[in-house]
Image: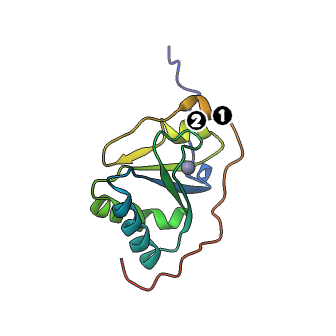
Amino acid sequence: METTSAAQPHRLSAIASFHAHIYFDDATRTEAARLRQWMADRFLVTLGRWHDALVGPHERPMYQVAFAVDVFPVLVPWLMLNHGRLSVLVHPNTTEPLADHTAHALWIGSPLGIRSEKLPSHGEAELAREPNTTPTIAA
Ligand code: ZN
């Protein structure tokens, strides 16, 4: 008997946007700042505030990079090449915040923990916001 016949894969259209969270500590803060400037110069993204204090499900200071679905195939490979010693969490934004940050996420560099108890199972999918960068350099 097939028990999975009713299961369907998630549709790509479930992804409203993406985030990359760039984690740093005292030893890597300068590298995080340099990476942020490199991204600002190269990609149409929304760079979030620096969070030196822990926020949300994150276990280390970080800043967020929000971007549209069509930026993923250029920004994510570029981060693979250029993250240096920094850990980066890339996750989709769907209506499932908990899964987005865990089962649906990918890590570039060393994976860190996620405080999953801080994340709801369901919520509003976050649409891409107005970019705040003006890229002038080809990636
Ligand atoms: Zn996020």
Q: Secondary structure under badge 1? A: loop
How many C-alpha atoms fall within 10 Å of the one at disc 2: few (<14), some, or many (≥20)?
Answer: many
Q: Position of residue 27 (x, y in %)?
A: 32, 53
The amino acid type found where label 1 is placed reads: Pro
Residue found 66% across the figure and 34% down from its top: 120
Gap between marks 1 and 2 measured at Cα: 6 Å
Is there any visible trace of residue 9 in the rendered image? Answer: no
Return the residue at label 2. 98
The amino acid type found where label 2 is placed reads: Leu
Q: Position of residue 1 (x, y in %)?
A: 50, 13
Nearest the eye: 133 or 80: 133
Q: Quadrant of residue 133?
A: bottom right
Position above or below: 13 against 100: below
| Mark drawn on residue 120 | 1
Determine if the C-beta at disc 1 is less than 8 A from ligand 1: no
Residue most extreme to the right? 124
Q: Position of residue 71 (x, y in %)?
A: 48, 67
Cβ–Cβ under 8 Å for marks 1 and 2: yes
Residue found 72% across the figure and 46% down from its top: 124
Position above or below: 138 against 6: below
Among numbered discs 1 and 2, the one appearing first in the sequence: 2
Residue found 32% across the figure and 59% down from its top: 83
